[in-house]
Image: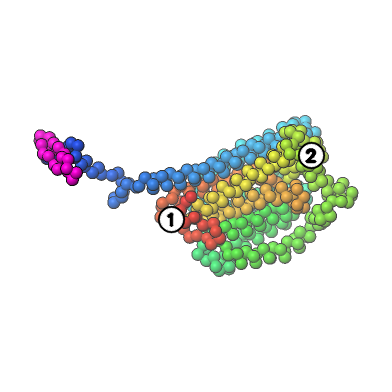
């Protein structure tokens, strides 16, 4: 046993056990260093702050994923309920079945939600690899509209029918176009300054599907596709001066395309006149006027779910294009504002995916899908409020319609797949093994880190 003097004048007793090599024990003994666990050669234990930071990254990204998923599922269920409420009277008058339209919408939801979940498991690199092939397949489906399988609905030849089954191929083109634009922007990510490198391939990929949809007379869908393309290009890093040239070209061409149809001319004329002519009220203004009356009769808290008067054959397309009017009538201003708030939160959550990603493909596709879903929702609501002429654009996730619901859910599944990959931070090339080049439009990751 040995005694060691300490600096403060006190002593410490160190005991050496028999048969040992002299390792000290006791009150003043120093503990041997314990080798730290490592994940690889030459690595050391991370500070506690680093561990906390990694945990915070995973929590933030997980919350984004589940926020998008939760809002989507809520809007789908809410849409089925509102389709039942808004369509029950007319369905009974036609088929003596109150639940006909709601049953079909529920079936579409049962098909679309699993498709969304499956799409959410597909890695971003596979979406990029198959993007142009998906676009080609969607264009092939659109060609069926001009075969004997094509069906004309309210003057628009934009449907195909297989027996009792009908589908709208232009809805598939929206998602395919978002993926195609994303693939082009990824390949051209180092050539954003050269407008030819960007807008020649994007123009080819855009003009063909737009022309096919316009040939069928569906200008509303074509306008949503334009919003989608512009949103994807902006988020993908296209230069503002180039986008201004595109917007100027659209502003020049759009009036000629619009006035090429006599039906569109009369609708726009009625909208510009404010529907003051009694003859127009009986024809073109019947739908927008009764839509406004439905909203006005709802007040702040509404007349109650299922108690709408407009759905009693007063408001055409009450379960589709004008379902927001029934929401305002039955649930009032409060219900309408809640729907708007849910779309805002959905948009903010998707923007978080854009800001947290370092992949040009992910940013572009997500930006295009945000522009598509939120832009279409705003257009639909603006039509119901009388701010735009009637365009025949449904409210995403809520209006009746199988093709629109299923493809919108598939698009959200793509965004969910991007959000699920975001926690893979730390690999040399980002979450999906792709390039880390950053756009110059303010949507780059903050300080190069995930937040």
Dot 1 crowding, Cα within 10 Å, few <14, some 14–19, many 20+: some
The image quadrant of residue 110 is top right
Q: Is residue 261 above or below residue 104?
A: below
Dot 2 crowding, Cα within 10 Å, few <14, some 14–19, many 20+: some
Where does label 2 land, which residue? Answer: 297
Q: Is residue 228 above or below residue 248?
A: above
Where does label 1 land, which residue? Answer: 429
Residue numbers of the magenta segment: 1-19
The image quadrant of residue 10 is top left
Indicate the position of residue 408 as horizontal and vertical percent values.
62, 46
- Extreme residue in the front direction: 9
The image quadrant of residue 76 is top right
Indicate the position of residue 106 as horizontal and vertical percent values.
65, 36
Whether residue 266 is visible: no
Q: Nearer the viewer, residue 129 or 433?
A: 433
Sequence-wise, the earlier of marks 1 and 2 is 2
- Numbered mark located on residue 418 in the image: none
Rendered residue at 39%/47% (across/down): 49
Indicate the quadrant containing the N terminus: top left, top right, bottom left or bottom right: top left
């Amino acid at each position: 046993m040995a005694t060691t003097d300490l600096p403060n004048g006190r002593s410490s007793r160190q005991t050496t056990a028999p048969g040992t090599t002299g390792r000290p024990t006791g009150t003043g003994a120093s503990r041997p260093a314990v080798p730290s666990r490592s994940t690889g050669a030459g690595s050391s234990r991370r500070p506690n702050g680093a561990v906390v930071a990694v945990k915070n990254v995973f929590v933030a990204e997980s919350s984004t994923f589940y926020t998008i998923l939760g809002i989507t599922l809520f809007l789908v269920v809410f849409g089925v309920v509102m389709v039942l409420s808004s369509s029950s009277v007319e369905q009974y008058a036609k088929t003596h079945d109150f639940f006909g339209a709601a049953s079909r919408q529920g079936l579409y939801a049962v098909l679309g939600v699993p498709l969304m979940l499956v799409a959410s498991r597909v890695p971003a690199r596979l979406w990029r690899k198959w993007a142009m092939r998906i676009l080609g397949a969607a264009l092939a489906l659109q060609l069926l509209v001009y075969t004997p399988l094509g069906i004309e609905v309210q003057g628009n030849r934009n449907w195909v029918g297989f027996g009792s089954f009908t589908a709208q191929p232009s809805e598939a083109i929206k998602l395919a176009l978002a993926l195609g634009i994303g693939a082009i922007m990824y390949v051209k990510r180092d050539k954003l300054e050269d407008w030819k490198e960007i807008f020649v391939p994007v123009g080819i990929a855009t003009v063909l599907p737009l022309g096919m949809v316009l040939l069928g007379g569906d200008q509303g869908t074509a306008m949503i596709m334009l919003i989608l393309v512009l949103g994807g290009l902006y988020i993908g890093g296209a230069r503002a001066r180039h986008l201004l040239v595109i917007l100027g070209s659209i502003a020049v061409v759009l009036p000629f395309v619009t006035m090429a149809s006599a039906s569109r001319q009369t609708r726009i004329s009625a909208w510009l006149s404010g529907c003051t002519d009694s003859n127009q009220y009986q024809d073109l203004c019947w739908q927008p006027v009764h839509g406004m009356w439905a909203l006005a009769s709802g007040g702040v808290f509404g007349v109650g779910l299922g108690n709408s008067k407009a759905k009693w054959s007063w408001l055409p397309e009450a379960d589709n294009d004008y379902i927001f009017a029934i929401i305002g009538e039955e649930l009032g201003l409060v219900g309408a504002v809640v729907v708007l708030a849910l779309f805002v939160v959905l948009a903010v959550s998707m923007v978080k995916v854009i800001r947290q990603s370092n992949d040009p493909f992910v940013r572009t596709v997500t930006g295009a899908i945000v522009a598509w879903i939120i832009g279409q929702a705003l257009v639909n609501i603006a039509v119901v409020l009388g701010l735009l002429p009637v365009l025949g654009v449904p409210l995403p996730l809520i209006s009746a319609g199988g093709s629109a619901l299923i493809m919108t859910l598939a698009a959200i599944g793509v965004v969910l797949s991007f959000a699920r990959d975001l926690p893979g931070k730390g690999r040399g090339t980002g979450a999906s093994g792709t390039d880390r080049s950053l756009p110059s439009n303010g949507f780059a990751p903050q300080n190069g880190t995930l937040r």
